[in-house]
Image (tube, helix red, strand yellow):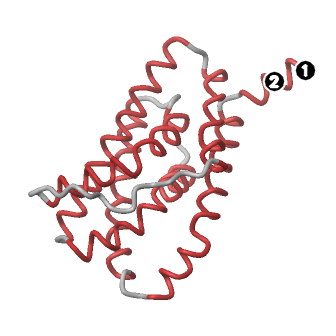
Amino acid sequence: MNYWLLALTFLSVNLDFFFMLIFLLKKYDFIKVLIGYLLGNIILLTASFIIGKALATFLPEWILGILGILPIYLAFHDDDDVDEQKETHKSEIITVLITYLSVCAGCNLSIFLPVLVGETITNFLITLGFIGLLTIIVVFIIKLVADIPTVSKVMEKHGEKLMKICYVVIGLYVFWDSGLISHLIAFL
């Protein structure tokens, strides 16, 4: 398991949601925001793994490298994310979970699916633990920096460009790691 790729994938997929986390942390209890966000990550990672395993059952890994096109597509596709979740719920945890799923489900599934497609159940469980730890660390950091105006300005100005660069890097890595590139070169 490539932990650098997992960390880059997690950060790039969730970069836009970090802004929402600032607002959610100002509005709701820290622990409830953390639990809702953690549950959202677990749900989307599990869905990506299960879908990837189903595809891997029928197709060789190098063909699944074509899935690397998904993050590259997202890098060049303008996405109008939901800025605020309009519906409110009694549970702050459910509100954070639904907000995260509504904003990030498509990106998470399309980015993590090609990354997790060839992993064993053991590596997937390690990945869940690693991403869970990153989630906790990120929420703590965002809580600390939420009140720093300079951070908000920099993320607002360059955040989307950085996210798109990360998506392209992830897509290219999937092409290479799956063996797709070597099969294409051998074919030519």
Judged left or right of residue 171, residue 27 is: left
Q: Residue at x 49, y 14 (%)?
A: 57
Q: Image quadrant of residue 105?
A: top left
Q: Residue furthest left?
A: 90
* Tag 1–tag 2 contact (CB < 8 Å): yes
Q: Residue at x 51, y 19 (%)?
A: 56
Q: Position of residue 75 (x, y in %)?
A: 63, 50
Q: Position of residue 76 (x, y in %)?
A: 67, 49
Q: Residue furthest front?
A: 86
Toward the viewer: 114 or 122?
114
Q: Residue furthest top?
A: 58
Q: Position of residue 126 (x, y in %)?
A: 38, 43
Q: Position of residue 146 (x, y in %)?
A: 37, 80
Q: Amino acid at mark 2?
A: Leu
Against 68, residue 55 (above or below) is above
Describe the element under mark 1 as helix, strand or loop: loop
Judged left or right of residue 185, residue 146 is: left
Within 10 Å of the Cα at label 2, are there few (<14), some (14-19), or many (20+) other Cα atoms?
Answer: few
Within 10 Å of the Cα at label 1, are there few (<14), some (14-19), or many (20+) other Cα atoms?
Answer: few
Against 64, residue 23 (above or below) is below
Checking the image for residue 184, the label placed there is 2
Against 44, residue 34 (above or below) is below
Q: Residue at x 53, y 42 (%)?
A: 111
Q: Residue furthest right?
A: 188
Q: Residue at x 57, y 14 (%)?
A: 59
Describe the element under mark 2 as helix, strand or loop: helix
* Alpha carbon distance from label 1 to label 2: 6 Å
Checking the image for residue 188, the label placed there is 1
Q: Amino acid at mark 1?
A: Leu
Checking the image for residue 110, the label placed there is none
Against 143, residue 10 (above or below) is above
